[in-house]
Image (tube, rainbow, N blue to C red):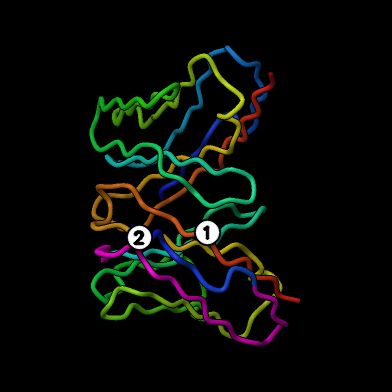
Amino acid sequence: KAGVTQTPRYLIKTRGQQVTLSCSPISGHRSVSWYQQTPGQGLQFLFEYFSETQRNKGNFPGRFSGRQFSNSRSEMNVSTLELGDSALYLCASSMRPLNEKLFFGSGTQLSVL
Amino acid sequence: ELKVEQNPLFLSMQEGKNYTIYCNYSTTSDRLYWYRQDPGKSLESLFVLLSNGAVKQEGRLMASLDTKARLSTLHITAAVHDLSATYFCAVTMDSNYQLIWGAGTKLIIKP
């Protein structure tokens, strides 16, 4: 069974640009959540989707957005990039949220110059 | 606001020793998760603890949850070098799909 796939693996952008990250969950998993990991702030929740509905969003500005498609694949978008957006962005999937383990992808390492 | 505190944040220990990592959280929750992260790698789920008194064990790792004390422990028995990693705990508020993470405990096990 294939794991959670995140693309691209590495990304370099400049301030002011926008970026779209992709996440393909494990087959059959309908919940997808996104996290930002930085050395200073640690792991922070971005948002969670289930059956194309965003059910919760973390404390991030509106520049961070996401969506989930009918096949459960998810994308997150960051507009008007800032230097502080440099981070490892992790996606996780599960069949049902909360009561079972999350399976994480390898992440997208975003560098904003 | 839900806050999660782990201690210690850094732990260096010898192989064969036992030690415990602590995870405290600030408000009511009955779901606690432990994850492992190797350097440059993603997160791997270790345990999901869903009720007060829950205890789970896998290999040399054992996790427990005391919801009344708002405390979870991750106990390492007879540590081996392969357990060197950063360990995170995370908590959700009831009916909330948002995971709140601890800062992580970096564990180094020396031969």
Question: Which of the 4 quarters of the picture holds residue A78?
Answer: bottom right
- Local secondary structure at mark 2: strand
What's the chain of the residue with tag 2? Answer: A
Horizontal and vertical percent position of residue B18: 53, 14
- Left or right? Give the position of A112 relative to A30: right
- Quarter of the image where the C terminus of chain B is located: top right
Q: Residue at x 33, y 47 (%)?
A: A101
B27 is higher (above) or lower (below) than A2: above
User: For mark 2, what is the residue?
Assistant: A93
Residue A25 within the magenta-colored segment of the rendering: yes
Horizontal and vertical percent position of residue A113: 76, 76
User: For mark 1, what is the residue?
Assistant: A106
- Local secondary structure at mark 1: loop
Mark closer to the chain start, 2 or 1: 2
Q: Residue at x 56, y 40 (%)?
A: B104
Q: Which residues are magenta?
A: A11-30
